[in-house]
């Protein structure tokens, strides 16, 4: 009886026959990738960029047979066999979340080797807009794709259920079209994709109103949809500027009701066809906070007034002891922990402030893990007049030392600067007053806030002082003095501001 090899034997023979060819093909292509090497959505006009590393002198293509160029060694730090390609997406192109095909060709029809990118690419159709809704209480937009330990640079926070027109994706962020030639990026975790078929959101503005109650001034603008917006709190003169993207004016009047105390001569500008700008002058030089959100499809801006009495005994102060629990923060070479030091200083500061009659609200009072997002939401709910966040600094160089304060919005710089000037009186070296600080606790617009990096735990001299209870007490006293100087300056500014607006006697 003739011998009949088993299936596994036949398979092994086939693999051994093909193996030399497979190994040769593998040698032709070492790696392939999109640039950046993450999943992407691209729209017409965007560039798909790719890179291949393989044997020098080959004929290499990508996507649908598009040629790739071998780079000169002077462009690749001496490496050979590096190929790159670029393709500008066209309106008629279709690609639905697929990897990119790379091939090494012998001629127009025979491929010697093929490989696929790990990342996937989708070409968006301009005829089927991709829409999304923001979700959660801390949705936000970024300016771009840059990242560091503080995250991407934030353009601003948004209310929930705001409709966004997505025009691309890179990794875990979607690109958002705000207006003609204006875009932003939104993290995937703060939006929910909508099914296809929706219209790009636009709206005419209705006639809007300005009013006040016992605590706030309000601006309400009727819209047809919950559109994205951006706010800026500007100084000299102090004013709140809010851009609503996708909105065009049909505002024929602005009704200003009784009870308005903080807002001045409000008006609007149509800065471009799809950007409606509200300009809200404030009557005091120092802004005390505002919030923006939707009530239905009505955009509501709530502007806080100055405290009735600009003195510590009349203030409610939020106090944040940085880090805590499993979030240790910076640790010195000798083992000093930021979470321990910040709580000790914050507790002393609380006692000092309460002794002066202030009401103090803490984000944590023990060695407890509290997420930064939870701290922001807590303070939004408690609504203090001011927020102070206590930290200790650290550097890779033990020689770096000094104290510093931080703020995000230029209108809140006076608080951070007043505290910084007082902290210098402790004898600590100055590390600076730092603006545009992209930290969670610096992000809320609802109240002036300052982050205080008391000193460097990584510096032996600073560390010794940070661990000294007497010096912790001195820090607390100086921070309190800084708040008092801030209030004193505002008493003077506020008086001058009101006098300037009083009508001249008859």
Image (cartoon, grey):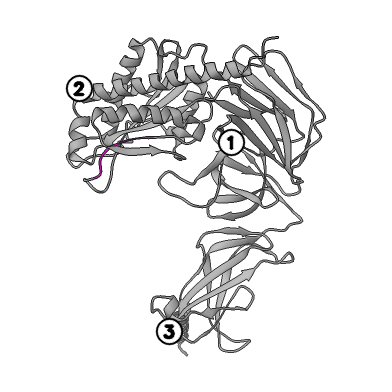
Quarter residue 440 falls in: top left
The disc at residue 123 is none
Cα gap from disc 3 to disc 2, whole angstroms? 78 Å
Q: Are marks 3 and 2 in contact (CB under 8 Å)?
A: no
Instruction: Report whether 408 appears left or right of 362.
Output: right
User: Disc 2 or 1, which lies upstream in sequence?
Assistant: 1
Q: CA distance from mark 3 to mark 1?
A: 68 Å
Mark closest to the chain's N terminus, 3 or 1: 3
**What's drawn in magenta, residue-wise?**
400-405
**Mark found first going from the N terminus, 3 or 2:** 3
Q: Position of residue 156 (x, y in %)?
A: 56, 38
Whether residue 143 is in magenta: the answer is no
**On screen, 431 above or below 112?**
above
Residue annotated with mark 3 = 16
Which residue lies at the image location 41% right of the left edge and 30% below the top edge? 416
Taking depth in this image into account, of 227 and 499 the one nearest to the observer is 499
Q: Which residue is mark 2?
A: 470
Q: Quadrant of residue 231?
A: top right
Label 2: how many Cα within 10 Å (few below 14, some 14–19, many 20+)? few
Q: Nearer the viewer, mark 3 or mark 1?
A: 1
In this rendering, position of residue 420 left or right of residue 252:
left
Which residue appears at 65% of the width and 13% of the height? Answer: 213
Mark on residue 232? 1
Q: Residues within 10 Å of mark 3 (few under 14, many from 20)?
A: few
Compare residues 362 and 427 and report the one nearer the observer.
427
Image vertical order of residue 389 relative to residue 82, above or below: above
The local secondary structure at tag 3 comes to helix
């Amino acid at each position: 009886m003739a011998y009949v090899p088993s299936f596994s034997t036949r398979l092994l023979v086939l693999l051994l026959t093909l193996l030399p060819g497979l190994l040769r093909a593998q040698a032709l292509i070492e790696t392939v990738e999109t640039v950046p090497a993450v999943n992407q959505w691209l729209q017409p006009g965007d560039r798909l960029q790719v890179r291949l590393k393989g044997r020098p002198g080959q004929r290499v293509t990508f996507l649908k047979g598009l040629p790739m160029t071998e780079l000169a060694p002077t462009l690749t730090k001496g490496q050979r066999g590096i190929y790159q390609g670029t393709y500008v997406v066209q309106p008629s192109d279709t690609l639905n979340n697929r990897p990119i095909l790379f091939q090494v060709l012998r001629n127009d029809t025979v491929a010697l080797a093929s490989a696929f990118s790990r990342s996937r690419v989708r070409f968006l159709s301009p005829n089927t807009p991709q829409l999304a809704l923001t979700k959660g209480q801390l949705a936000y937009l970024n300016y771009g794709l840059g990242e560091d330990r503080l995250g991407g640079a934030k353009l601003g926070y948004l209310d929930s259920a705001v409709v966004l027109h997505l025009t691309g994706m890179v990794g875990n962020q979607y690109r958002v079209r705000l207006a003609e030639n204006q875009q932003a990026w939104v993290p995937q975790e703060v939006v929910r994709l909508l099914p296809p078929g929706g219209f790009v959101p636009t709206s005419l503005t209705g006639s809007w109103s300005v009013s006040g109650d016992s605590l706030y001034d309000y601006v309400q603008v009727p819209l047809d949809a919950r559109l994205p917006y951006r706010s800026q709190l500007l100084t000299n003169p102090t004013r709140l500027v809010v851009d609503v993207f996708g909105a065009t004016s049909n505002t024929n009047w602005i009704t200003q009701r009784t009870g308005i105390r903080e807002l001045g001569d409000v008006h609007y500008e149509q800065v471009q066809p799809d950007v409606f700008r509200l300009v809200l002058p404030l009557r005091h030089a120092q802004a005390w906070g505002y919030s923006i959100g939707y009530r239905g499809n009505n955009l509501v801006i709530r502007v806080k007034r100055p405290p009735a009495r600009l003195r510590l005994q009349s203030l409610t102060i939020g106090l944040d002891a940085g880090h805590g629990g499993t979030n240790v923060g910076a640790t010195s070479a000798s083992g000093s922990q930021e979470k321990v030091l910040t709580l000790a200083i914050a507790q002393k500061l609380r006692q000092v402030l309460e002794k002066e009659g202030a009401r103090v609200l803490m984000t944590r009072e023990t060695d407890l893990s509290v997420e930064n997002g939870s701290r922001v939401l807590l303070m939004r709910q408690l609504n203090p007049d001011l927020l102070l966040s206590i930290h200790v600094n650290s550097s890779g160089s033990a020689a770096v030392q000094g104290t510093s304060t931080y703020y995000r919005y230029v209108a809140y710089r006076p608080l951070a600067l007043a505290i910084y000037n007082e902290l210098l009186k402790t004898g600590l070296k100055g590390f600076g007053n730092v603006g545009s600080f992209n930290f969670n606790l610096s992000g809320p617009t609802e109240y002036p806030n300052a982050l205080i990096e008391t000193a460097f735990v990584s510096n032996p001299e600073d560390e010794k002082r940070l661990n000294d209870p007497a010096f912790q007490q001195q820090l607390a006293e100086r921070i309190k003095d800084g708040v008092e100087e801030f209030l004193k300056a505002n008493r003077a500014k506020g008086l001058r501001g009101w006098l300037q607006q009083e009508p001249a006697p008859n």
